Each structure stands twice: as C-alpha cells, then as structure tokens.
Image (spheres, rainbow, N blue to C red):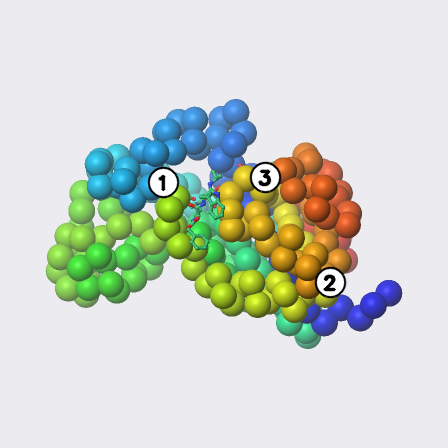
C-alpha cells in the first residue's frame, strides 16, 4: 500500500443530511421550495433581496439548530490525528465540520454563518437574520448579503483547492451528487494527478464512473468505517 501523505476530502449536502439539514436535489430538496434562479443567483438577489435574505435566514437558523453527526466527528478525529497534508473542501455552507472537530476546512461555496457588507467589503460572523436589512457593524450601511457563492459567482479558494488536488495521494468525495462545477470537476483533476479516488455516497452520483472505488450507504456509517 503506497504511503498516503496528502489527502483531499470533498463533501456535499449528503454529509449533513443525517444532521437534519436538507440536501438540494432530494424530492424535498431546497431547490424545489424555491426555483434556483430566485434564490441562489445574484440576479435573484437583485430582483427580490427580501426573499433571498429570508431563504438564507431560514438556512442559518437550521444550521444553528443542527448538530454534527458521526461522519463529521470521524473527519474531525482524522484531522486531529493525521500528520500529513489534509484539506477538507466542503460545498456546504454549514459549520458542522468545524463543530465536529475539523480544522483544515475550506468552504468553497461560502458560509451560512458569514455575511458580507457590499458597502465596505467586511465579512461578519452572523447567527441572526438579515431579512430586515440590519446595519453593517463596521460601516453602518444596510448593505449586508449572505456570504454565499451563488450560481455564476466564482467559488472561493479555487487555486488553493486545485493545487491540493493535483498533489493528493488520496481524494475522497462524500455526500455529493456531482451536479455542480467546478466542484464536480475535482475528481478528474485528482485522477490526472495520480491520486487514488474514493466515493462515499448514498447512491451513485453523476461522477461515480470517475472513481477507483464507490461505497454506497449513509455517511454516518461509511465515513467512520473509512476513517478507522
Ligand atoms: C461558476 C451555495 C464561474 C448556495 C451552491 C462548467 C464549468 C464551470 C461552471 C459551470 C459549468 N457548467 C455550468 C456551470 C455553472 C454552474 C453549474 O455548475 N451549474 C450546474 C447546475 C450545471 N456553476 C457555477 O455557477 C459555479 N460558479 O461557474 O463560476 C467560474 C467557474 C470556474 C472558473 C471560473 C469561473 C458556482 C456554483 C456554486 C453555486 N452554489 N451552493 C447554497 O448553498 O444555497 S451549489 C450547491 O449545489 C452545493 O453547494 C453543491 O455545490 C451543489 C451540489 O449539491 P450537493 O452538495 O451535491 O447536494 P445534492 O443534493 O445535489 O446531492 C446530495 C448527495 O448526497 C446525493 O448524491 C445523495 O445521494 C447524497 N446523500 C443524501 N443523503 C446522504 C447522502 N450521502 C451520504 N449519506 C447520506 N445520509
């Protein structure tokens, strides 16, 4: 077995499903409640900011009320024990990885508990609501938006993420449908870099054919089994 010095983990909504947070594409998915173009695009925000603020206010309240599950905790233990390079890239906007003990986490699509002032560009940790347009604590303007990467916006840390994937010995994808790019393109980058690729998911995803191995089941069972 080759020595594993460098691991990249990519997670999606499926890892937080057992913590009670909705995924996007299940039948009760978030997108069904609100058409994507209404709530997860800059155009939607410009058209109806109050609707979009309410949508993320609801998500923020759900995040605060949720608890990390056995999958988040297993990754937290891995982060504490693994002496090599580890990057946990999450598409999720919840903070359950951090509350599960993980430290080396990158939120490539932003964070539900972070808000961003469009007037002074300062970001703030925020667990309350934005629906009534509160003033920015830094500049006093009522110009705060969710610190979320919407469709058509540039994901965060892409250079750092692609560089880590290119160097990875092991790339593990957990709980994602592989529906959205550039996140869904990372496994192809990992294969190009010579990494071993493993998918842990409830069902086969759009990218399953690109993985060396796919294990099917709930993350709360598969992830602790893989970490131990
Ligand atoms: C961009 C934040 C320009 C919002 C999200 C080609 C290349 C580049 C871009 C594109 C391209 N083609 C199209 C595009 C545009 C677009 C895109 O990909 N569209 C899709 C619809 C075709 N991409 C973008 O706009 C991106 N930006 O392109 O900028 C650019 C790009 C590169 C370089 C230069 C410029 C930005 C996209 C980010 C949008 N924001 N989230 C919010 O959270 O409200 S996307 C959102 O959906 C997630 O963050 C995630 O990324 C994505 C997929 O969701 P998943 O997390 O996978 O969840 P899903 O419900 O789909 O699946 C859950 C899975 O879990 C399932 O497989 C299920 O079986 C499994 N599961 C369920 N329960 C469990 C489980 N598994 C284990 N255990 C369980 N218990």
The residue at label 2 has a CB less than 8 Å from ligand 1: no
The image's mark for residue 40 is 1
Answer whether labels 1 and 3 touch (C-beta < 8 Å).
Answer: no
Q: At x 59% / y 39%, what residue is drawn? A: 177
Residue 10, compared with residue 18, is above or below; it is below
Give the residue displayed 21% in from the left and 36% down from the top. Answer: 47
Foreground mark, 2 or 3, reads 2
Residue closest to the far right = 1
- Relative to 116, say whether 159 is above or below: below
**Would you place residue 168 above or below residue 177 in this image?**
below
- Of residues 191 and 161, the one nearer the viewer is 191
Sequence order check: which comes first, mark 1 or mark 3?
Answer: 1
Q: Alpha-carbon distance for marks 2 and 3?
A: 23 Å
Q: Are marks 1 and 2 in contact (CB under 8 Å)?
A: no
- How many C-alpha atoms fall within 10 Å of the one at disc 1: few (<14), some, or many (≥20)? many
180 displayed left or right of 167: left
Secondary structure at numbered mark 3: loop
Query: Which percent across, then down, holds residue 119?
Result: 17, 59
Give the residue at mark 3. 177
Does label 1 point to a residue whose CB lies under 8 Å from ligand 1?
yes
On residue 144, the disc is none
Residue 45: image location, x then y, percent: 26, 41
């Amino acid at each position: 077995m080759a020595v594993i010095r460098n691991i990249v983990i990519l997670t999606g909504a499926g890892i937080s499903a057992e913590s009670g947070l909705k995924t996007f594409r299940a039948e009760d998915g978030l997108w069904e409640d609100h058409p994507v173009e209404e709530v997860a695009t800059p155009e939607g925000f410009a058209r109806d900011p109050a609707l979009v603020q309410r949508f993320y206010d609801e998500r923020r309240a759900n995040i605060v009320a949720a608890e990390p599950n056995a999958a988040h905790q297993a990754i937290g233990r891995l982060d504490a024990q693994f002496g090599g390079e580890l990057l946990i890239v999450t598409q999720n906007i919840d903070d359950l990885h951090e509350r599960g003990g993980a430290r080396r986490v990158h939120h490539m699509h932003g964070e539900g508990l972070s808000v961003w002032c469009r007037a002074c560009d300062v970001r703030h940790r925020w667990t309350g609501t934005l629906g009534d347009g509160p003033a920015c604590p830094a500049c006093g303007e009522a110009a705060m938006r969710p610190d979320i990467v919407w469709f058509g916006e540039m994901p965060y840390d892409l250079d750092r993420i692609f560089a880590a994937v290119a160097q990875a010995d092991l790339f593990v994808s957990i709980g994602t449908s592989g529906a959205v790019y550039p996140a869904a393109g990372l496994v192809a980058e990992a294969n190009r870099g010579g990494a071993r690729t493993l998918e842990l998911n409830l069902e086969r995803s759009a990218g399953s054919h690109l993985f060396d191995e796919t294990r099917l089941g709930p993350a709360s069972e598969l992830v602790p089994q893989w970490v131990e």
